[in-house]
Image (tube, rainbow, N blue to C red):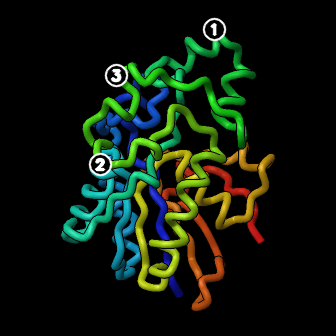
Amino acid sequence: MSHLILVRHGQSEWNLENRFTGWVDVDLAPKGKLEACKAGELIKKLDVSIEHFFCSYQKRAINTLKLILNTMRIKDDKIVKAWELNERHYGSLTGLNKDEMKKKLGEDKIHIFRRSWDMPPDPLSKNNPYHPLNIEIYKNIPKEKIPDTESLKDTYDRVIPYFKKHIEKKISENVIISAHGNSIRSLCKFLFEINNEEISNLEIPTGNPLILKFDDNIKLLDAKYLDQERAKDLIKFN
């Protein structure tokens, strides 16, 4: 049996402030560091040998994975960082408070932007300091690959090709991916064969490992959260 473990980063500084974060490179809040360490303890109890470790370019995902591996007493020198696993880009909403924007634009509009399949927010100005073009960690990414805004579909269209090319064939040796709410939602949509309407109902909790079990032919057999007290309902898969 093979295992793929998906972990949304622990609570970040902007999660705590209830701000749209996207590609902005904010770090973990103190609670997020504790969540990451607890995730490591839960994964350690599985007593599974894990050979491959992936995360996004963003420090909240990187540091979550490092804390997990440190807790498991595994060296972090094999971590592979991929911008394709980054959080969804929230366009002109980036940096803004979610509650304030609900009051300004209405709850229905914000829900569409946050949960719809193919409706992106307005693009973020390239002159904005929060635009990825102005963030140092993205300097080596081809400029034509850097978005001004993204829908979940746009996120899916970069996450899944990367997963198929670089991660899927490694599942037989067990894999951890530390990423973000929408990059993990994209992976779940693909792996659970969730349709475009149902995906809006899927929410991913911070710092709670989601373990997926596969047979020898990489067919998904089972999926569950390790911290059942903070588990979210998973949409049924085939």
Q: Residue at x 77, y 50 (%)?
A: 196
The answer, for residue 18, to whether it is visible in the render is: no
Residue to which mark 3 is pinned: 129
- Splitting the image into 4 quarters, where does residue 234 fall? bottom right
Task: State yes or no: discs 1 and 3 in contact (Cβ < 8 Å).
Answer: no
Q: Residue flagged by tag 3: what amino acid is it?
A: Pro
As measured in the structure, the alpha-carbon distance from the residue carrying label 3 to the one carrying label 2 is: 17 Å
Q: Nearer the viewer, residue 45 or 131?
A: 131
Q: Residue at x 79, y 55 (%)?
A: 195
Residue to which mark 1 is pinned: 104
Residue 183 located left or right of residue 69: right
- Splitting the image into 4 quarters, where does residue 14 fall? top left
Where disc 2 sits, the SS reads: loop
State which tag comes first along the sequence, 2 or 1: 1
Q: Residue flagged by tag 2: what amino acid is it?
A: Asn
In this picture, is 150 found above or below 85? above
In this picture, is 77 found above or below 195? below
- x%, y% of residue 43? 39, 68
In this picture, is 63 found above or below 54? above
| The furthest residue to the top | 104
Mark 2 or mark 1, which is nearer to you? 2
In this figure, what is the number of numbered marks? 3
Residue to which mark 2 is pinned: 140
